[in-house]
Image: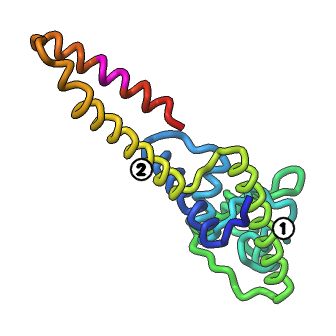
Amino acid sequence: MEHISPEVYAKILDADLKNILRKSASGKTLSPAEHARVVAKAAGCNDSVTTAKTAVELAVLLGAGRRQVTRWQKLEGAPPAAPNGSYDVVAWREFVRGRGLKAAKVASEVDVAALRARKTLAEIEDRELRVALKKGLYLLKAEVEGEWHRRMALLKNLLYAKLTLELPPLYVGHDAVDIQQINQNALDAVLREAASIE
């Protein structure tokens, strides 16, 4: 399989997010991963990590410094750590967004850690997308459109040939009911043939 360019990858992620938003707008319940994706996007992030193992990892995912997160943890309504010491990133993003908190400029080593985390996440998502593409779970829009146009042209040719070349001689000497049955049989034949086209 060919390498997916960052532009194509971004378009696929954007299309996936639009599908999630359409699902939500239609009243369907989002999965936890889909919900996390929407919350992350609303918070200005493109990742959808739902759990941080440590406060440092949480700070990186929120784009804040560790000390800043420690101050935020003292605010009323701040999401608590889980019994195992991990943090719910989705809850934290909602908390930060709801309170209008802003991340201060953090130390360069945290910036580097954030960049590494984002790079790792992007690599993981890229691998997952490649696997999904190989499994046939996703198709590029251009491929779908091309196949649709090809099939519509074939169907048009089949109908044109049937209606203009084959059917008129069959109508001679038949009444309206017979002609209706001839048309139905011809249409059924065209649809069977179109369905068998690969």
| Residue 137 point in image, percent of width and height | 65, 45
| Residue 22 point in image, percent of width and height | 46, 49
Asked whether 151 or 174 is in front, the reply is: 174
Give the CA distance from mark 2 to mark 1: 52 Å
Q: Is residue 6 above or below residue 159?
A: below
Between tags 2 and 1, which lies in front?
A: 2
* 37 on left or right of 166: right
Asked whether 125 or 99 is in front, the reply is: 125
Residue at the image position 66 percent from the left and 61 percent from the top: 77
| Residue 195 point in image, percent of width and height | 46, 30
Looking at the rendered structure, the secondary structure element under dot 2 is: helix
Q: Is residue 87 above or below residue 30?
A: below
Is 184 a magenta residue?
no
> Disc 2 residue type?
His
> Disc 1 residue type?
Ala
Residue at the image position 78 percent from the left and 58 percent from the top: 127
Residue extending furthest toward the right: 84
Residue at the image position 66 percent from the left and 46 percent from the top: 32
Q: Which numbered marker is on residue 124?
A: none
Q: Is residue 105 above or below residue 155?
A: below
Is 187 a magenta residue?
yes
* 102 on left or right of 86: left
- Residue identifier under label 1: 55
Report crowding for label 2: few under 14, some 14 to 19, many 20 or more residues within 10 A (C-alpha).
Answer: few
- Magenta-drawn segment: 185-189
- Any part of residue 95 in sight: no
| Residue 149 point in image, percent of width and height | 41, 50
- Residue identifier under label 2: 149
